[in-house]
Image: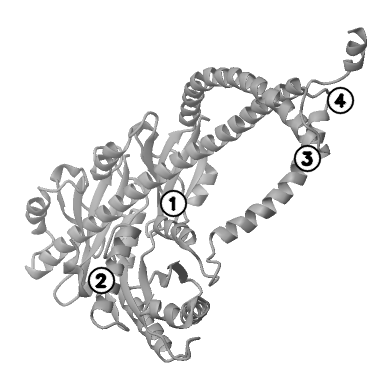
Amino acid sequence: MAGQMFKNKGKIRFHLLIIGLLVFTMLGTTAILTSVALKSQTNTLTESTLQSNFEGARNLNVAMNMLLDSMQRSLGSAGKYIADNDLTLEQSSNFLSTMLSGQRSFNSVVIFDESGVIRSSTPESAGLREGKINTPAASKALKDRKPFVSEPYMDSKGQLTVMISHPLFDRTKQYRGFIAGFIYLQELNVFSDIFNHAIRSQKGSYAYVVDRSGKLMFNPDKGRIGEVPDAEELQAQFMKDKGRTATIDVNSQAYLAGYVAIPNIGWGVVFQSPATAVDEAMRSLIISQLKVVIPLFGVLVAVSLWVAQKVTHPFKLLTATARSIFVGERITDPPFTNHWNYEAHHLARAMMRAFGGLQDQADQMSEEARTDKLTGLANRLALDERLSKWMSEGLNWSLLILDIDHFKSVNDTFGHKTGDETLLHLARILESQTRDEDLVCRFGGEEFVIVMPSQSLLAGRQLAERIRKKVESTVSPTGKPITVSIGLASYPEHGDNFNQVFEMADLAMYNAKRDGRNLTKSADDYQHEVV
């Protein structure tokens, strides 16, 4: 016993090695997969949030573009009405009140003459004093004489304002001034209505608009309107068509922002969410995963230990068996091992040698099992396997069944040797007339089957006729041509499986024999005969 213990000292038991490797592999794999999964999920959540915010910004961009276009059209329609009705600019006040009373597009509307002097306004409580207005926005509208959207500016009352204008012309195309709609950014306005519906779509998310210089124009916090954020990277992107980025708000909190620029007026629409939303989502996800993973891992470890014990015991027996097979001995006693890798060493040698020979034999037997010995064509087993594959792939196919006419008389007259040569003769004709992707089989006796993947019934009929004519015009081993009767059907037109389609083609073939032989018939010709 002591000698045995001495001999075993320093040896590694096989089952302990397997268990150790198994546990190490599970722990390492779990750690790697968890790390990769968490990183991937974080990236996915971040990209999803950025994409969602970008879509929100783009939707707001579309709404604002449509609204600006509508406002310009409204001002243009007002100008056209004034020109068409020869109204003086001073007479337009009542019209403006009537026309715009049902709209909420502007906080006020004012008409300026060609000198920039106010001629009428609505509402009259807009607070604008009569006289000439010398703001940069009004000056640009007078100079350009075309539709115009101004940058935000402080008006005479000290409120941040955007002016949208449209030129006025009389019937003779003489310039008369312009009509301007004013939006007071720090009051309720048409843009704030849009953003009130868009903001707070999720916790901490909100939308805002900045002008060309990065100044806030619309923001949930009205006290911040007119402020210039610190996100220089984001502002620099506004002049591009579209994009996504991460930015830092003025309070130094990280945000994931989607933004879209409005190129024709230089504004940028931003929709952003706090980056902490991703962290919170990941934290919740990790906790929920750990609640599942930890118990599952414990169960897997316990099961793995039990499986390892079970696996290693027969492995030792297999090793002893492999050694006995290798040296040609009978197994009478359990194997005796005194080397830590003894089992694996002998098992590998025996198994590789045995496997090589067995595999060669298996391959040869498999090929023989799928080939007709007489003709070298595929047999029924090969046909079943190929059809199973094609049907699993959803392929349509057409089926031809060929039977040699009066083949019994060939055997009776010329003998079975000539009969076999006749079958081989027909097999070579079938191979020469079919495509590489077609499957040609000897189904039994003098009956042959051709399956044409992805081919219609019409294509099958054309092939059948080529074969029939080739056979009847080619001298066979009997010293004269033979003839064949052919039936065909298609999947799925004539059946939901091979047996149903085969039955339809077989019926068509027998109808060809009934009608005189050396004919091609399809299932369509006699489908009404199927019960």
Q: Is residue 213 above or below residue 310?
A: below
Q: Quadrant of residue 525?
A: bottom left
**The residue under label 3 is which amino acid type?**
Ala
Q: Quadrant of residue 447?
A: bottom left
Distance of mark 3 from mark 2, alpha carbons? 57 Å
In the image, taking residue 343 as reference, residue 272 lies left or right, namely left
Distance of mark 1 from mark 3, alpha carbons? 80 Å
Residue 126 rendering spot, x and y as whole percentages:
19, 44
Q: Judge whether residue 139 can be spotted in this image.
A: no
| Residue that numbered label 3 is attached to | 350
Marks 4/1 in contact by CB < 8 Å: the verdict is: no
Marks 1/3 in contact by CB < 8 Å: the verdict is: no
Q: Nearer the viewer, residue 266 or 406?
A: 406
Closer to the chain start, of discs 3 and 2, is: 3
| Residue that numbered label 2 is attached to | 523
The secondary element bearing badge 3 is classed as helix
| Residue that numbered label 1 is attached to | 212
Q: Nearer the viewer, residue 331 or 313?
A: 331
Q: Residues within 10 Å of mark 1 (few under 14, many from 20)?
A: some
The image quadrant where one finds the N terminus is: top right
Closer to the chain start, of discs 4 and 1, is: 1
| Residue that numbered label 4 is attached to | 339
